[in-house]
Amino acid sequence: MTTFHSTDISKKTFLVTGGAGFIGSHIVDYLLKSGAGKVRVLDNLSTGLQSNVALFSQHPNYEFMLGDIRDTATCEKACVDIHYVTHQAALGSVPRSVKDPITSNEVNVGGFVNMITAAKNAGVTTFVYASSSSVYGDEPNLPKIESRTGNLLSPYAVTKMTNELYANVFHKLYGMNVAGLRYFNVFGQRQDPNGPYAAVIPLFVTGILNRTPVYINGDGLQTRDFTYVANAVQANIRAMLSSNPLSFGQAYNVATGNNFTVNFLYESIASMLGINHAATYREPRAGDIRDSLANINKANTLLGYIPTQQFMDGLKITVEYFKQLNIQ
């Protein structure tokens, strides 16, 4: 396992909200394998899966707490005796937010304020949270740099930008160590291939394997900075354990600094699976950004972040994972 920290964490305690989710469970995995003193997961299992954290259930330093971040008492309880919080709990998906902006706001904004307030009151050392590349909106320039954003295109993007605004206020007003991570199309093992808001890569893999209809929104020429999940884990660990005071009160691009079209993604997956299966094209999705590419210099300079897996490396691992899952 690649290590992203050099400090002893055997006496440190961590809270991973949304820890039964895709990215959260990978963070939990890293912390436990690295000898963390305690790793507490808070999750209401609305989108997270118990199966994602089942492999940790017998670990003596693992603790699971079933609860909802919309409840202030739950957030306060979750932060008791915690040094570091990585806040991954949220309702993801642009289409979900377009369909139901109220619930997205309640979870992603209300829940965020509950969580960061509880962390402040508990004296948590550092609070790291998941933001999103959606905050760049219609800003046309590539690559995306953190200081330059445009008009937001979805309720989901509004919730993530609101998180950043709150975090910066908590940093300046209360002196909290906070850092936001703008994820760019994170993918990997344990990403849910089921449901109406499933991510594109598991949808492509399972659709091609089963030879069921696979849909590409728009012309497929839209580009994304696809980011393997190990890189997101790295950013969280480096941000939580940073000893650089300048690294806090910031938001960072978490990506690889390369982009590829959705068509190329689809063709690569089909080639890896050895299956010729044509995709079906349909109308573009409302609220989607056309092109995405990150400048990752800021994360490199202030956090020491360097992607360990590029797109094709991570894609091979991910395709094999879903292929095995489909066979079982």
Image (cartoon, rainbow, N blue to C red):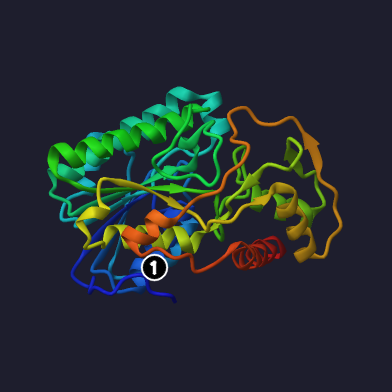
- Categorize mark 1 by other alpha carbons within 10 Å: few (<14), some (14-19), many (20+): some
Q: Tell me residue 256's x, y (percent).
A: 52, 58
The residue that appears at 42% across and 61% down in the rendered structure is 233
Say above or below: 178 vs 84: above
Side (left or right) of 43 relative to 80? right
The residue that appears at 30% across and 46% down in the rendered structure is 250
Side (left or right) of 264 relative to 181? right
Residue at image mark 1? 30
The residue that appears at 14% across and 47% down in the rendered structure is 122
Taking depth in this image into account, of 133 and 296 the one nearest to the observer is 296
Taking depth in this image into account, of 89 and 243 the one nearest to the observer is 243
Side (left or right) of 185 relative to 213? left
Say above or below: 228 vs 95: below
Say above or below: 85 vs 216: below
Q: Tell me residue 289's x, y (percent).
A: 59, 35
Taking depth in this image into account, of 261 and 77 the one nearest to the observer is 261
